[in-house]
Image (cartoon, rainbow, N blue to C red):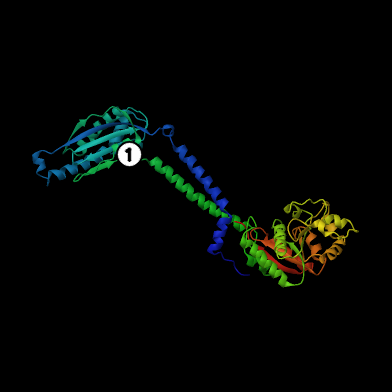
Amino acid sequence: MEEETLDLRDLWKIIRRRKWIIISITVVFLILGLIMGFMMQKPEEINSNGDVYESTASILITNFSDEKGKSVKGQVELNQQLTNIYGTIANSATVAGKTIKDMKLNIKTDEFTNDINVIADANSQVIKIYYSGDKNNNQQKVLTAYVKNFIEEADKVYPQGKLKVLDEPSETQEISQDDFTKLITPVQQSGQQTTTTSKTTPKAKSKKLILAVALFLGLMVGFGAAFVVEYLDNTVKKREEAERILNQSAIEIIPYDKLRSGEVYKEAFRSLRTNLKQKGKENVFVITSPSGKDGRTSICLDLAKSFAVIGHKVLIIDADGRNPKAGSEFNLKSDFGLSDILMDSKYKFDNISRFKIDEENIYTLCWGNQKDNPSDLLDNGRLKNILEDIKNQFDYIIIDTPAFTKYSDAQIIARVSDDISVLALITEGNTNVDDIKRFKEIIELSQIKLSGLIWRKEGI
């Protein structure tokens, strides 16, 4: 047995066929990601209107004395060094930790430093410190303690320079987030070196990361589930597989067309009509399939139309007593039909006009009123006589039957006469492989000649 391989087209068809599994699972993961991100927010973050409460202080870095200044190459380089060094100290976890302890703040050090913004301007020798938050937590008082701890720590770590508070911490004011962002964004000027430590938003980043991970996991699980479902699905996916099981080549491939009105769809039935006319002299065709819901009735009707359009007189017989559909397709009343004729041994087909429908050259014999034991009716010996009576009155007769492996109805009809041509309809992605194998066993045991295979493509 040949090992089956999947090419890119097969993979793409699997994805299209199982797209709703992939989409559904991905959406579920995204919803879970959104829920997780929402749960990570604090109540104040959820209710925040985007405003920021902030306080600002400015510290001036004074120069070295002349003697100390002589030891450096230039005063400008010294200013730049001092600014960068003190800017780093101003944003250190040490200063933040002391302030948290002094002010008895119930906050972690990394969370507190996220609310501190330091702008160190080497050109003006000024360090600006901003303390902001989504709530009014007395930013002025906290920033006052922060500036005090910064100056003390700076004098301890790098005592060569001198720091002087230029602007005491301002009163807490409320401004919009956009205005605050502009406020802490330095303007780069020629010859100016500015070190900025801006407020970060790790929670916002983590939410985006959660959504990205949720999307990735959703797609991976979705694709995995799709391929698992595809693997467990035992329906036939390739025409070659059905041809190999039945040892029959497909006489026609019917494309998917939801409205059954496209030119490609119609051309497929013209080709099927030509193939059947060339195949033999039989004018009675039994359309059956291994499984149910393969679209047998629609194939019968459209095949009949393709014969009728070129002037052939065609009779459609609905022999599916289990689920008769031909009448409903043409909006016909099924108060009289094949089952009633099978019950009446004296009935004669002397007035076929009663079966004429609005479609030109098409006649329809519905199933009728008898719903019980269709197999017994079909096997009562009357069917052969009925077909003999009407065979010469029509150019072609097309018989719609139930699923071959579920009921014996199609077998009974196929054995009525050697002049009957049995056509097996196999639908891609719908017909079960085991049903096809069982179908082959039954026709071989019943010595029924299979005249052809019709391959019907699935709608994706």
- Residue 436 visible? The answer is no
Residue wearing tag 1? 199
Work out whether residue 349 or residue 323 is closer to the camera in this orientation and state it: 349
Residue 357, image x, y percentages: 76, 56
Work out whether residue 281 or residue 208 is closer to the camera in this orientation and state it: 281
Total numbered labels placed on residues in the image: 1
Identify the residue at image location x=70%, y=67%: 273
Q: Quadrant of the C terminus?
A: bottom right
In this rendering, would 53 be left or right of 20? Answer: left
Q: What element carries label 1?
A: loop
Work out whether residue 238 or residue 128 is closer to the camera in this orientation and state it: 238
Q: In which quarter of the image is residue 378?
A: bottom right
- Residue 82 visible? The answer is yes
Residue 239, image x, y percentages: 63, 65
Furthest toward the right, the residue is 346
> Few, some or many C-alpha atoms within 10 Å of disc 1 (few <14, some 14-19, many ≥20)?
some
Work out whether residue 133 or residue 18 is closer to the camera in this orientation and state it: 18
The amino acid on which the numbered mark 1 sits, given as a three-letter code, is Lys
Residue 327, image x, y percentages: 76, 53
Residue 191, image x, y percentages: 18, 46
Q: In which quarter of the image is the N terminus?
A: bottom right
Q: Quadrant of residue 412?
A: bottom right
Q: Quadrant of residue 66?
A: top left
